[in-house]
Amino acid sequence: MTETKPQHADLVIRSARLIDGTGSPSTHGDVAISNDRIVAVGLLGKIAGSYEIEANGKALAPGFIDVHTHDDRALLSDPTMACKVSQGVTTVITGNCGISLAPLSSKSLPPPLDLIADQPGSLFTDFAAYLNALEADPPAVNAAAQVGHSTLRIGALDNLERAATDKEIRRMRNQLDQALEDGAIGMSTGLYYDLASAAPTEEVIELAKSVNDAAGIHTTHMRNEGDHIETSLEESFRIGREADVPIVISHHKVGGLSNHGRSRQTLKMIDEAQTQQAIAFDVYPYVASSTVLGVKRLEAASRIVVTWSKPHPEMSGRDLSDIADEMGCDLIQTAQALAPAGAIYFMMSEDDVRRILSHPNAMIGSDGLPHDDHPHPRLWGTFPRVLGHYVREQGLFTLEEAVRRMTTLPAAQFGLVDRGKISVGSYADLVLFNPETVIDRATFEAPSQTAEGIDLVMVNGRIIWKEGAPTGARPGLALRRQSLGPMGLNPSVGR
Ligand code: ZN
Ligand code: CU
């Protein structure tokens, strides 16, 4: 059957370096779009567009999928989503690290829930209400949302410093089942954090069975990403096997000076597990992490920068050690004085970051914290940093390969049907960028800066970013589980 090309399209983008998302070498050509879909790809001299864009050889790629975000509330409070759109991101996955805004009503916001909720009124008692709010006042980007295990725990347990009882597990499963029915795509855990660290593996397995029932996905901020990282990987694999769910290891890293180099071992473990079960991971391209400011994280870091503080907002952006000197306190006392607060922790090695990024199955996830006063630069810089710094400047892998890790790989992992690829019939989620100049400008000192070299971004056929600014269009969809395909890469696909 030969494909019949239309004679006319809403929009034709001409003379682009087409990077289709599959990792194959780029080609030169045009892309025609009508309504929300790509209708033709190739040399389209015969098709006239109502509107035409001359790409002049710049790169046209599928819009990037940010697989690890905390954009749950930002999608509602700042729907133009400039921090992500300016990087070429067109779809975000929310509800990570065990925290989501729904389903929960609570008078208190224990950390790290305070990273995404600024007041109890930000929460939604049911997941349908959250997704409906997204649809009623849509953001510029598409979003798929997970339920946080810690969010469920806050709703079901009177004391979070213990395992859930059978009755509480049933209650959480009912809530989770309903959320999945409402359109959540899976469940995340943050076993590292106090809200969930008392939860035994068995508690998570029981809940993950609900995720299996809904053919969803399970992502995890593991119990430990430092001294005991291998044990935590084993735990994650076990949850995946026993509940029979695909697992995503979130923001894979090895933290703490004494653990530097251990990514050799952890990637080997992931490779082996991938031959048996669906295991994936994401990574952000920085040697510093960021989360709430807490006493147990102080030792592992060589430098700590405050990102926000409720009682001392004026300390945002400053080094904790400088504040400690000024206050005449030690680091622990200073952290306590600033809490509730957030921080950046310099604790990974460049070699580990490069090794993890270089893995062919590494997805890219920003883990950006959009409500921080002085956020980690990953919020604005992740994707251009991979393309400009790690690909062009450092030659870590090809541009086509980088784009694959940001597009078809995550689309397959999260079941995003007809997204992540430039092909006829796919949604027109696209980014036009200059591969010679694309780079992150966000730094640890000045983090809220748009990237350079991202010329145009389109979601569902509508332009959302142009000439360095949002257009105001908000065509983003809430991607409900029911509209998505199978999740997790089949283990035989492995690598
Ligand atoms: Zn996390
Ligand atoms: Cu996170």
Image: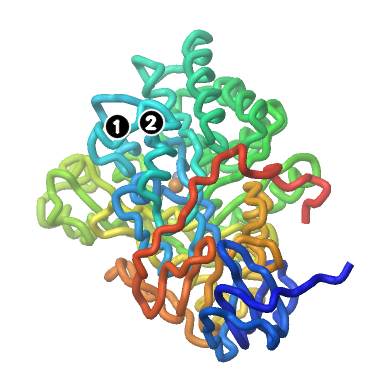
| Coordinates of residue 408 in the picture (x, y in percent) | 67, 60
Q: Residue furthest right?
A: 1
User: Is 347 left, or right, of 264 in this rendering?
Assistant: left
Q: Residue furthest front?
A: 7
Q: Is mark 2 within 8 Å of ligand 1?
A: no
| Whole-number angstrom distance, CA of label 2 to CA of label 1 | 9 Å
Q: Which residue is mark 2?
A: 194
| Coordinates of residue 14 in the picture (x, y in percent) | 60, 85
The mark closer to the camera, 2 or 1, is 1
User: Is 333 left, or right, of 12 in this rendering?
Assistant: left
User: The residue tagged with tag 1: helix, strand or loop?
Assistant: loop
Amino acid carrying mark 1 in the image: Pro
Q: Nearer the viewer, residue 402 or 407?
A: 407
Q: Which residue is mark 1?
A: 110
Residue sitting at x 26%, y 59%: 374
Q: Residue furthest bottom?
A: 56
Q: Nearer the viewer, residue 300 or 169?
A: 169
Residue sitting at x 71%, y 30%: 244
Q: Quadrant of the C terminus?
A: bottom right
**Disc 1 crowd, CA 10 A, few/some/many (<14, 14-19, 20+):** some
- Would residue 170 be visible to someone looking at this image? yes
Residue 2 placement: quadrant: bottom right
User: The residue tagged with tag 2: helix, strand or loop?
Assistant: loop
Residue 294 placement: quadrant: top left
